[in-house]
Image: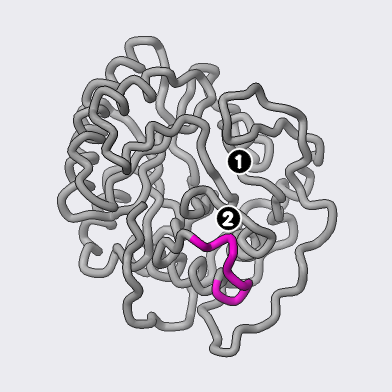
Amino acid sequence: MHTPTEEPSLPTHVTRRRLFGAGLAAVGAALVAREPTAQPPAAQTFLADAPPPLLLPPPHPAPSPSPAEPGTPTLNRPVFTLKEYRQVVPGPAFPDNAVALTIDDGPHGGWTPQVLHILEKYHVQATFCMIGNQILGQEAVARSVVAAGHQVANHTWSHPATLAQMPADKVEQEVYRAQEKIHETTGRTPTVFRSPGGAVSPAVFAAAAKAGMIPVNWDRDPKDWTKPGTQSITSHLLAARPGDILLCHDGGGDRSQTCAALRTVIPALQSRGLQFVALGGQP
């Protein structure tokens, strides 16, 4: 998968944001789990049984978010479905026919506007999982995502494929620098975290919670970033069921197949009665 290169360091201050309400603290421990396969979900605990390990300060201070309010949950697995998301994030129940479209690896000066045009045509809201250093030079594109009514999520600073193997201080740098850049550019502070490749570790969970974010993966992946062909992407997305979180990309390479597939998939799913919802709205 595309891995953007590192850019010069940003300022080390991260603007204080409003985190989730105290209602998160009351979330039950026994929740529905789902492995990243086609198998039916099994019961599993989301909230960590014990506090995350103490994170030692890095040798070179990383950007640091405002302290998380009590009740921001530290999960021990990502969210895979809308049902799971609502179990850890208080709010109105999603419609029974809802699906969520998430768009990773942007913003991109060419592909993101095309995706936005498609979403506007069909009146669809989505969640754009932005890479911090991809915003550099594309600030106007990032702002256009928010201006169009979509949500933004944190997809790390440089999209390291080895994030789950990195030490805690490096994980914090990836998470907090992206959080800072996204907020500085769009005025939004993400409440959803998307790890590169969906890979997670105790350090990843801890950093996301400290920044006030819920790790969200997906359960419908057409692997469009591999450019498998428009028909392959289309058929995988057309298999979506109510409650699914769909994964697509607007960055990381040629996304013409993704755009072509979305032009078919979105109206087809809508004709089946499915409704698109976005994740990560701020309280």
* Residue 126 vs residue 33, the one in the foreground: 33
Q: Nearer the viewer, mark 2 or mark 1?
A: 1
Residue 263, by quadrant, is top left
User: In the image, residue 185 lies at what x, y percent?
Assistant: 32, 66
Distance between the alpha carbons at the discs numbered 2 and 1? 11 Å
Instruction: State the residue at coordinates (23%, 54%).
Output: 108
Q: Residues within 10 Å of mark 2 (few under 14, many from 20)?
A: many
Question: Where are the magenta residues, as a range?
Answer: 162-170
Front residue of 52 and 25? 52
| 126 w.r.t. 63: above or below | above
Q: Is residue 115 left or right of residue 58?
A: left
Which residue is most to the bottom? 59
Disc with the residue nearer the chain's start (2 vs 1): 1
Q: Amino acid at mark 2?
A: Met
Image coordinates for residue 162, horizontal then vertical, percent: 51, 62
Specify the farthest residue to the top. 272
From the top left corner, tell me how far across and down residue 210 is, in percent: 64, 65
Bin the neighbour count of mark 1 within 10 Å (Cα to Cα): few under 14, some 14-19, many 20 and up.
Answer: many
Q: Residue at x 59, y 31 (%)?
A: 92
Q: Secondary structure at mark 1?
A: loop
| Residue that mark 2 sits on | 213
Image side of residue 112 versus residue 29, left or right:
left
The residue depicted at 52 percent of the width and 53 percent of the height is 193
Most common secondary structure along the magenta stretch: helix
Pointer 1 residue: 79
Q: Residue at x 28, y 33 (%)?
A: 228
Judged from the image, the secondary structure of the residue bearing numbered disc 2 is loop
Question: What is the three-letter code of the residue carrying label 1?
Answer: Val
Seen from the viewer's position, the closer of residues 251 and 84 is: 251
